[in-house]
């Protein structure tokens, strides 16, 4: 927010919302609502809405209309800050998820293992994962494994059985079926095609 667009108090309030400090945002808005004029509050509202939209934070139209915000600015400020806090929490979890999956995708990990590693319920973990990565957890792990399998086959140093075990597949036949489904050819056929 630029200096010309709002008063210093509302700029401070914007920063509290941006940081996800719900309680502070509500208290500041109660204090500043008495001195701010309608135009300043509308400008502040627009900036907060842009902030949320830029972060792809879903908005409930009935809660986020200017008319609704005007009825209780403090509640609106708290709600927006709460949305930002949730956004930052999910980003923290996403980083932890990525680290865990990268470190363990070669093992026989499950969604329950991954969720437990960061103290989330499997359902919340699954929804967060799909929202962030665009695919479900199992498909993501399979994708990583298949990309690694392709890389290992190209190196031509290990047998298919060794590659299968390295990637968490205890049944080499199952590994072969997954590979074929993913790349439209068996690991052996892929190996032959690159070794010609």
Image (cartoon, grey):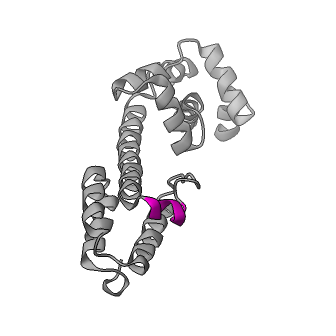
Q: Seen in the image, is 129 located left or right of residue 8?
A: right
Please determine whether, in this image, residue 115 is positioned above or below residue 37. Answer: above
Which of the 4 quarters of the picture holds residue 14? bottom left
Give the image location of residue 117, x and y in percent.
35, 25
Residue at the spot x=24%, y=65% of the render? 31
Which of the 4 quarters of the picture holds residue 11? bottom left
Q: Nearer the viewer, residue 183 or 190?
A: 183
Residue 18 part of the magenta segment: no
On-image quarter of the N terminus? bottom left
Give the image location of residue 58, x and y in percent.
54, 52
Residue at the spot x=48%, y=68% of the render? 50
Give the image location of residue 166, x and y in percent.
46, 22
Residue 68 part of the magenta segment: yes
Q: Is residue 47 visible?
A: yes
Q: Nearer the viewer, residue 145 or 151?
A: 145
Residue at the spot x=55%, y=17% of the render? 161
Q: Seen in the image, is 172 located left or right of residue 31?
A: right
Please determine whether, in this image, residue 54 is positioned above or below residue 137. Answer: below
Give the image location of residue 73, x and y in percent.
39, 61
Please determine whether, in this image, residue 172 is positioned above or below residue 184. Answer: above
Question: Which residue occupies the extreme right position in the image?
Answer: 184
Q: Main secondary structure of the magenta part?
A: helix
Q: Nearer the viewer, residue 51 or 128?
A: 51
On-image quarter of the C terminus? top right
Question: Which residue occupies the extreme top position in the image?
Answer: 171
Q: Seen in the image, is 101 located left or right of residue 14?
A: right
Q: Which residues are magenta?
A: 65-71
């Amino acid at each position: 927010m630029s200096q010309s667009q709002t008063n210093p108090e509302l700029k401070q309030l914007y920063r509290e919302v941006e940081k996800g400090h719900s309680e502070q945002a509500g208290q500041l808005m109660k204090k500043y609502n008495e001195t701010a004029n309608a135009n300043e509050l509308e400008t502040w509202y627009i900036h907060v809405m842009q902030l949320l939209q830029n972060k792809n934070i879903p908005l409930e139209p009935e809660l986020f209309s200017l008319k609704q915000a005007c009825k209780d600015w403090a509640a609106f400020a708290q709600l927006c800050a709460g949305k930002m806090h949730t956004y930052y929490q999910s980003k923290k979890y996403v980083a932890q998820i990525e680290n865990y999956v990268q470190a363990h995708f070669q093992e026989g990990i499950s969604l329950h293992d991954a969720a437990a590693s960061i103290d989330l319920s499997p359902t919340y973990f699954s929804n967060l994962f799909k929202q962030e990565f665009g695919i479900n957890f199992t498909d993501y792990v399979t994708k990583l494994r298949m990309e690694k399998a392709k890389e290992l086959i190209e190196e031509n140093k290990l047998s298919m059985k060794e590659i299968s075990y390295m990637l968490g597949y205890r049944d080499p036949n199952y590994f072969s079926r997954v590979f074929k489904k993913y790349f439209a050819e068996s690991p052996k056929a892929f190996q032959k095609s690159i070794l010609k």
